[in-house]
Amino acid sequence: MKRFVSTAVVIGVIVFGLIPVLCSAAEYPTKPITLINPMAPGGTLDLQGRAFAAAAEKYLGQPIVVTNKVGATGMVGGSAVASAPPDGYTLLVASVNITNAVEWENANGRKPPFTRHDFAPIAAFTMSPTLVIVPADSPYKTLNDFIADAKSKPGKFAFCSGGLYGMSHLPIEIFAKATGLKFRHVPFAGGGPCLTAVIGKHVEFAFQYPPTTLPLVKGGKLKVLAVAGNKRLKAIPDVPTTKELGIDAEYYGWVGLMAPKNTPAPILAKLRDVAQKVVNDKAFVDPIEKPGDEVQYLNHEELAKWMDKESKIIYAVDVELAKDAPKK
């Protein structure tokens, strides 16, 4: 009898302890949500994060405040969300940069401050391929022209990126490996300065993304030689893909939403439902697609599988890069 009473008490404690959590999840959200962007203002993550926040507020009934926590290729902002209370009130504008930063640490034998398993994926909004860009008056009319000249001048061509081992550096390393080419790297603190360097002919080329690149193409300042993906973009239908050209150099700068792991299932379900609504909402779609990007939705399971796949690819590239990186 005593054992029965004791067991009943334990069950009661567990059940009553869960009631506030379940009630809180059912009422979520009851206050503003903080959406952390781990990269600099004005970039692709900022554009898409703010577009998501503006569209999602009407579905959630609460303000969503976008906050930039910049540093260490996304590690600072990522760490802030990974260590936040798992209550749905601190979310991350996530991207491939999270994978890049984590796998760079792994490739160097260092323990990263978090991994992808410290987050609960909600959804991806876009899967943007990188664009191979050169100055508008570049003599290269096709990517094959560029490759032929680069092969005749190994190590002479310079490219820029928005930072070491980030989402505009890694795709060029993948491209270089696929083509057997050698390039010089000029890293900048962001994609904007890199684009300026290409326009000013301080470097021969770069790999950048549709939202920031295509307006400059339309303005006659840049030329796109290829799309580093498996399908052409609607905004530039005449530009071929690397896949069409027989080059295995696909790289996608996905952007999406994540919560800390252990966020209650009802809260995640609500956020995932809202994300699916947002990607079909004109208020979100227009700011993404008018500059030339394309909305592409992945649910949480698809995003998790994608990250598993890309982690292996990026880790393999980083291991090779780590061999030549300066040792501290």
Image: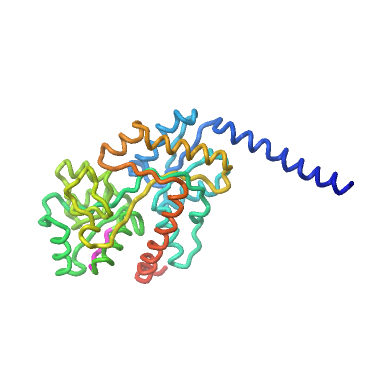
Image point 46% across, 64% down: which residue? 106
Left or right of residue 122: residue 207: left
Q: Which quarter of the picture shows residue 179?
A: bottom left
Image point 34% across, 58% down: which residue? 164
Bounds of the magenta segment: 181-186
Q: Which quarter of the picture shows residue 46?
A: top left
Give the colour scheme of this rendering. rainbow
Name the image quarter holding the C terminus.
Answer: bottom left
Q: Is residue 131 magenta?
A: no
In front: 302, or 290?
302
- Locate residue 79, reporting x and y percent: 50, 50
- Locate residue 229, reporting x and y percent: 28, 54
- Locate residue 16, reporting x and y percent: 73, 38
Left or right of residue 90: residue 50: left
Left or right of residue 324: residue 305: right
- Locate residue 170, reporting x and y percent: 33, 59
Total numbered labels: 0
Q: Is residue 108 above or below residue 90?
A: below
Image point 47% across, 44% down: which residue? 122
Residue at the extreme bottom of the image, as rendered: 323
